[in-house]
Amino acid sequence: MSKDFSTMEDSNPSANTSIHEVSDPTRRVVLRGGLGALMGAMGAAGWGLGGCASLADMGSSSGAGALLGFKSVPVATVDAVSVPPGYVTQALAAWGEPVGLSGEMPAFRFDASNSAAEQQAQMGMHHDGIHYFPIDGSSTHGLLVMNHEYTDDGLLHPDGMKTWTAAKVKKSQAAHGISVIEIEWLDQRWQHVQPSPWARRITAESPITLSGPAAGHALMKTAADASGTRVRGTLNNCASGLTPWGTYLSCEENFSNYFNCTTPPDAHGKRWGLKKVDAALYRWHEFDERFDASRHPNEPNRFGWVVEIDPFNPSSTPIKRTALGRAAHEGAMVAVTRDNHAVIYMGEDARFEYIYKFVSRDPIQPGGARANATLLDHGTLFVARFDTDGKGAWLPLVHGQGPLTPANGFADQGEVLIKTRQASDLLGGTKMDRPEWTAVDPKTRKVYCTLTNNSQRGADKFPGVDAANPRVNNTMGHIIEWLDDGDFDGIRLTWQHFVLAGNAASSRPNARGNVKGNAFGCPDGLWIDGRGVLWIETDMSTKDMGQGDLAELGHNALLAADPSTGEIRRFLVGPAGCEITGATGTPDGCTMFINIQHPGESPSERSDPDAPRKISNWPDQRPDGRPRSATLVIRKADGGMIGT
Ligand code: FEO
Ligand code: CA
Ligand code: CA
Ligand code: CA
């Protein structure tokens, strides 16, 4: 989300500066694409090597030549998607479309009158992180797995939030979480296959297991779960990640907004943004008391984790991996060291929070998800410190080391992980301008992270600028890049800014000279495709869009950057009131999928049910309809590779 929901949280004002075969024998489905096919879906080796031969009837192109081969699109403020000449788009799997559960295919009702039970079998609201998982290595048949970050309850119910009921809470919970859908290229279109044996919804009510050092911890136990290992649901699933062993990582972001305190929270709760909310954003606590954090003080500790899901095993229970730390997690991007250990880069999107990485203790094993079922339960979490000399360090969050001792409130490693923010404060991690997505370039081994904005940088009672976050009142955001010393698991790093975002007046020289190409603000999503293009997605909030520094930037956009030259070119502009998020593609590089999130969002971020279609009615444009988040398919009309 754009999210004043996220930016309302100012909890840190203190002053320290060959993929293995993945198979499901019961369905006789085998991912035979191997490392190339699966890493290709996340934009690593293998993407584009085969061109678009399977689409030869459309006339494929080779993808050779300059990295950015398209004509940039101008800034736009229309309620439609703009793409360069020669490109076509298609909306797919909008909110409310039946997800494809066998025997449960409730049609979407355009007045939003579907029940909670129907919503449970439909696409959730507000699509975010997404990945394409090829079936049998295919670029024309696969699974899309995607997050549904949050609900706009003004749109979700026929009369919005004018009345508030238990049924509305249940529907909101059912519209959260994750969807798994099957898609196939048929009749010159991508089609959502319904029903499908893989179709799945995971919601804020689904059973989820806790694993790793914080599982079973005293701080995780609740009245409903004395074991501290079984959680109901996942929520605010923002960005995502793909593991080389074929699973999907879904990240719980602004969980504190779902809880209400009737009495003031303790120091721990306060550090995590818990508070008494007069007009609680989601109002779940009014009918589901586990979201009353005063009555159930440990329930919030069970959120803010990275959740691992095996999309090819629909009966598997998702797992919250506590070894990766607790945060308002934006995303989790996986890199693989030369000796085959997994390194996961993660941003925490809140003002003055941190950038993290997790290094697995053990190497990745052949044999897919089953063989790596506990890989993410053992390893070391680090927080980043960016120094003034362009160098930096990864500081380990290990119990008993440095200040992470019982005397400072950390009884054990579980407590370090549940209190990741407090641990990072003591270690002296660098307080960043809202770290969102990270991206790993497997060729150069550089890592990129968006710092979307921070209007409080340098304000009264908040930290001032530092080398890595160099602008007071950073309305435009920036992108930082670094190279870990030696390998992805190195504990020293070298960093620079890739770009300080902005318009002509506010942009400053980046590390490679002057900013070249098109202006943009508030970078959020990032993805490096198989050709090496760095895709940048923007999330200017609807409150700020068209105002101040963002005045001439139009709607949110998707831009393509050439990391070797620094050139940034606008590729796509979205409909009114939307955010552009989530990016993935087929192994052949000929189809890209992004998510159009919250078209029609009002500046208040809670829509009046009668008003949103005055802002946007995308994608249906029906007089009786409502704007709907949806996946957007992008292709070249000639079937060639995206970006050429
Ligand atoms: Fe969910 Fe920080 O975007
Ligand atoms: Ca948003
Ligand atoms: Ca954002
Ligand atoms: Ca985001």
Image (cartoon, grey):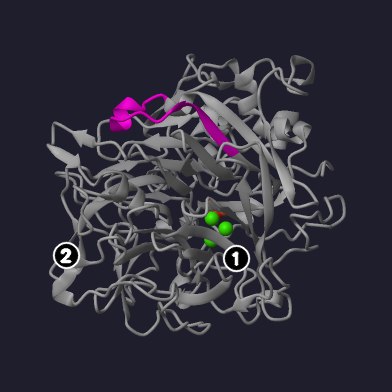
- Residue type of the residue flagged with mark 1: Ser
In percent of width and height, residue 86 lies at: 32, 83
Compare residues 545 and 329 and report the one nearer the observer: 329
Can residue 171 be seen?
yes
Q: Is mark 2 within 8 Å of ligand 4?
A: no
Compare residues 467 and 562 and report the one nearer the observer: 562
- Residue type of the residue flagged with mark 2: Ser
Q: Which residues are magenta?
A: 357-374
- In the structure shown, which secondary structural element does the residue marked by tag 1 occupy? loop
Q: Residue at x 45, y 47 (%)?
A: 240
Location of the N terminus by quadrant is bottom right
In percent of width and height, residue 91 lies at: 31, 68
Disc 1 + disc 2, Cβ < 8 Å = no
Comes first in the chain, label 1 or label 2: 2
Above or below, 603 against 22 in this view is below
Q: Residues within 10 Å of mark 2 (few under 14, many from 20)?
A: some
Splitting the image into 4 quarters, where does residue 52 fall?
A: bottom left
- In the structure shown, which secondary structural element does the residue marked by tag 2 occupy? helix
Q: Is mark 1 within 8 Å of ligand 2?
A: yes
Splitting the image into 4 quarters, where does residue 34 fall?
A: top left
For disc 1, the marked residue is: 541
Q: Is residue 269 magenta?
A: no
